[in-house]
Image: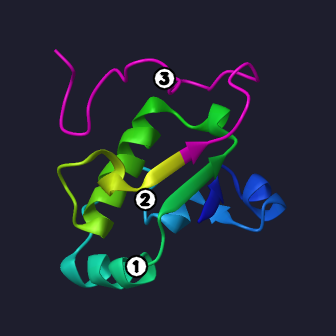
Amino acid sequence: MTCASTGKAAVAISGTTVHTALKISLSRLLLLNSETAQQYRTLFKYIKVIIIDEVSMISAQLLLKVDSSVKQITGNLQSNFGELDIILIGDLRQLPLVRSTPIYKQPKQTLVGPIL
């Protein structure tokens, strides 16, 4: 599966946005209901690798959401990214994120609360 952080980048690689591909809310973490998780599980049955382009535009918090969403979809909650291979592509020396923590730094808070 190929996806990107922005719609324009997604179109360029014949993919979709990370948010659409993994059913990620723009504002907050939403747990998938069992019906939606099952629908995505069926779609992901043969997916072994997720390629994410323009990684410089992905915040540490969004990467946590990607991990959480993939775990819910695969049903494998104990392994990073549900044991799928994740390939991140992009130039981390491009423009910095606006008001977000880059993926190479620890996020200011986890999905459930502040990091102590």
Label 2 residue SS: loop
Q: CA distance from mark 3 to mark 1?
A: 32 Å
Q: Position of residue 2 (x, y in %)?
A: 64, 61
Which amino acid lies under the numbered mark 2 shown in the image of this protein? Answer: Ile
> Are discs 3 and 1 less than 8 Å apart at CB?
no
Label 1 residue SS: loop
> Are discs 3 and 2 less than 8 Å apart at CB?
no
Is residue 97 rendered magenta in the image? yes
Q: CA distance from mark 3 to mark 2?
A: 18 Å
Residue, x 57% and y 46% (percent of image)? 87
Q: Position of residue 50 (x, y in %)?
A: 54, 57
What secondary structure prevails in the magenta region? loop
Residue, x 67% and y 40% (percent of image)? 89
- Above or below, 80 against 103 in this view is below
Q: Which mark is residue 24?
A: 2
Q: Position of residue 35 (x, y in %)?
A: 25, 85
Q: Position of residue 72 (x, y in %)?
A: 26, 63
What crowding class fits label 2: few (fewer than 14 Cα within 10 Å), some (14-19), or many (20 or more)? many
Residue at numbered disc 3: 101
Which amino acid lies under the numbered mark 1 shown in the image of this protein? Answer: Lys
The answer to whether residue 28 is seen in the rendering is no
37 horizontally vs 9: left or right: left
What span is in magenta?
87-116
